[in-house]
Amino acid sequence: MVDGAGEAVAFRLWPPVAIGAPLVAGWLATLLRGDPVDLGGWRVPLGWVLVLLFAGWNGWSLCLFGRHRTGLLPGQATQTMIEQGPYRLSRNPLYLGLLALYLGLALLAPTFWGLVLFPAAVLLVRWGAIRPEERFLRERFGARYDDYTRRVRRFPGSRDLLMDTAGNTVSAIDPFSQPLRGRRREAASWSLSRSGPGVKV
């Protein structure tokens, strides 16, 4: 874990490592075993488009960090919430950009196994960076962050499940709702009560 200092996020896994490790593993698998399919010539222009999108998107996001004078690297203090620019479309634009870079590099390499391992990069960055960051921001900014999570998703089009300060999963639509597990138990109890006597479950 990358430890924070009270005013910084304590990542379980540094985001570039979380996203880069599966890509490197896929590239090594391609070197050692080869790719089972030819990705074709289309991969080169698409790969460069993704790399250029990464450069512009993440460059825009990083400029906002400098403008707001808030921490970016592990251990640096988070001074404010950023809600402008890319942060109006995604709560995690830097991670979204890194994932686009992953796909772009996998196509340009090329490495079929790198593309196969892309879901592992998404899961690792969610576990290692996004969830600790959400917990930290909720504790630091409270209701302001909860309002932000209702307006903006992690990634455009995603169905978010958020974590409360106790580590429980809560609904993305209503961050103040009780944990989903408890809600499922209540729904089951309501269904049984509606079934009436004499019904076996």
Image: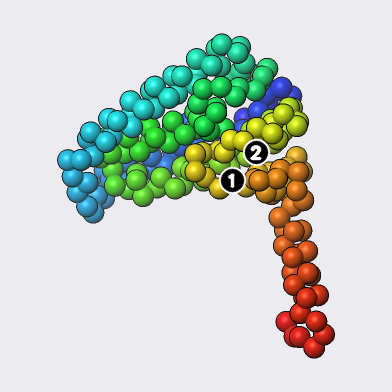
Residue kind at label 1, given as amino acid type:
Asp
* Label 1, residues with CA under 10 Å away: few <14, some 14-19, many ≥20: some
Q: Which mark is residue 160?
A: 1
Query: 17 or 189: which is nearer to us?
Result: 189
133 up-or-down from 198: above or below: above
Tell me the mark number nearer the camera, choosing from 2 and 1. Answer: 2
178 up-or-down from 12: above or below: below
Residue kind at label 2, given as amino acid type:
Arg
| 196 lies left or right of 70 | right
Q: Can residue 117 be seen in this view?
A: yes
Question: Between marks 2 and 1, how big is the CA–CA gap?
Answer: 10 Å
**Which residue is rendered at x = 80% and y = 82% of the image?**
196
Return the x and y of residue 195 as percentages of the image width and height.
76, 79
Q: Name the residue under label 2.
A: 150
Please report contact status of discs 2 and 1: CB closer than 8 Å, yes or no: no
**Which residue is rendered at x = 75% and y = 40% of the image?**
165
Total numbered circles: 2
Location of the C terminus (image quadrant): bottom right
Q: Is mark 1 on a helix, strand or loop?
A: loop
Task: Determine which quarter of the picture holds residue 52.
Answer: top left
Return the x and y of residue 179 as percentages of the image width and height.
74, 52
Location of the N terminus (image quadrant): top right
* Label 2, residues with CA under 10 Å away: few <14, some 14-19, many ≥20: some
180 up-or-down from 187: above or below: above
| 40 lies left or right of 116 | left
Query: 94 or 156: which is nearer to us?
Result: 156
**Which residue is rendered at x = 43% and y = 36% of the image?**
99
Return the x and y of residue 57 as percentages of the image width and height.
43, 24
Task: Determine which quarter of the picture holds residue 144.
Answer: top right
| 193 lies left or right of 103 | right
Query: 107 or 20: which is nearer to us?
Result: 107
Query: 2 or 153: which is nearer to us?
Result: 153
